[in-house]
Each structure stands twice: as structure tokens, then as C-alpha cells.
Image (cartoon, helix red, strand yellow):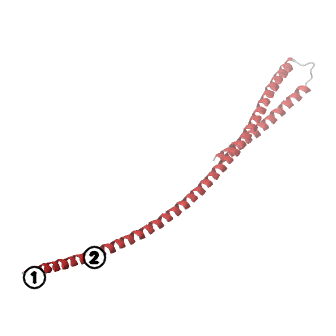
Amino acid sequence: RAQLGSKNALAKAQSEQSALTAELDARSSECGRLRAELASRPAEGAKDADICQLVSLRAQIAEQRSEVERLREQVRISAKSGSSVEEQSAALKISIKDRDDTITRLKADVADHAAEHSSTVDELKMKLSSSQVEVDECRRRSEDECSTSAELRRKLRTRAAEVDKLSSELRTSGLEAER
């Protein structure tokens, strides 16, 4: 938009400059015509009306000269503003290029960070999977140990019951032997 606006401003300044130059040329030719008319009039024997007209024409020439100078100044200002529009356009183009470069760099940074993040996520998933396998193995060992422990307790109770039975039989036979 800024570039389009600067182009429009430049075109407007150039069209104003062209119009002012055309007006300046027209007024300059009018001044030349009036000078030629003054030069062609005889200086001697001029009547009062001719003198008044001569004074009026000289006043018009002076006004037109000041108008010509004003128009020349406007042309200079238009030329300067035209160049400043071009400078602004160049500055805007540089700014836009810098912004585009920054966007490209930021996109590359985002892509790098996304790849790094993806890599980290994959690594963490592998670690989690490995940890889950280890947990499952520990659970299996714990279950095996629990079942082994339960089996050993059962055997211990069975033997303890046998020992109690034998102990009781031994007491009973010891008592019978004493009798």
C-alpha cells in the first residue's frame, strides 16, 4: 500500500510539475508578446490613452513576472517533493525487504525449533516406552516373587503343621513312654 501510495504521490507531483511548466511557458510567451507590442509602439507623440495603456501593460508585465517566479518556485518545490517521494519509496522498499527477511528468518527459526521439539518429543516417547517396559518387567517379577512368597508361606505352614503334628505325637509318645 505504501509503495502504491508513493507511486501515486510521485505521479501526482509529476503531473503538477508538467501543468506548472506548461502554465509558465504560456505566461512567458505572453510576456514576450507584450514586450514586443511595447517595443513596436512609437515613443514620441504618444497620446495620453497610449501612455495609460503602456503603464497598464507594464503593470501587467510586472504581475506576470512575479507570477512566473511564483510558478518557477512551485516547480522547484514539486521537483524536490518528487525526489523526496522517490526517497520515501526507496526507504519503504528497504523497510519491506528487511521485514520480509525478518519473516523468512523467523520462519526458519520456527522450523528449527519445531524439528528440535519433535526430536525431543520422540526421545521422550522412547524413554517412556522403555520405562513402561521396565515397569512391566518389575511388575512381573513382583508378581512372580509374590506368588513364590505365597507358595513358600503355604509350604512353611504345611511344614509347621507337620512339625506341630510331629511335636504333638512326640509329646504323646513321650507321655506314653513315661506311663
Q: Position of residue 123 (x, y in %)?
A: 50, 65
* Picture disc at residue 177: 1
At 86% from the left edge and 31% from the top edge, which residue is drawn? 32
- Amino acid carrying label 1: it is Ala
What is the spatial separation of the Cα atoms under label 2 and label 1, in whole angstroms?
36 Å
At 48% from the left edge and 63% from the top edge, which residue is drawn? 124
- Amino acid carrying label 2: it is Leu
Q: In the image, is 15 to the left or to the right of 151? A: right
Q: Position of residue 174 (x, y in %)?
A: 12, 80
At 51% from the left edge and 62% from the top edge, which residue is drawn? 120
Q: Position of residue 7 (x, y in %)?
A: 69, 46
* Picture disc at residue 152: 2
* Picture disc at residue 62: none
Between residues 37 and 61, which one lies in front from this camera angle? 61
At 36% from the left edge and 70% from the top edge, which residue is drawn? 139
Name the image quarter holding residue 107.
Answer: bottom right
User: Which numbered disc, 2 or 1, marks the residue closer to the eye?
Assistant: 1
Query: Element under label 2?
Result: helix
Name the image quarter holding residue 89.
Answer: top right
Number of residues whose C-alpha sits closer than 10 Å to that of mark 2, classed few (under 14), some (14–19) or many (20 or more): few
Q: In the image, is 61 to the left or to the right of 107? A: right
Q: In the image, is 128 to the left or to the right of 19? A: left
Q: Sequence order check: which comes first, mark 2 or mark 1?
A: 2
Most distant residue in the front direction: 178
Up the image or down, 109 lies above or below 65; here it is below
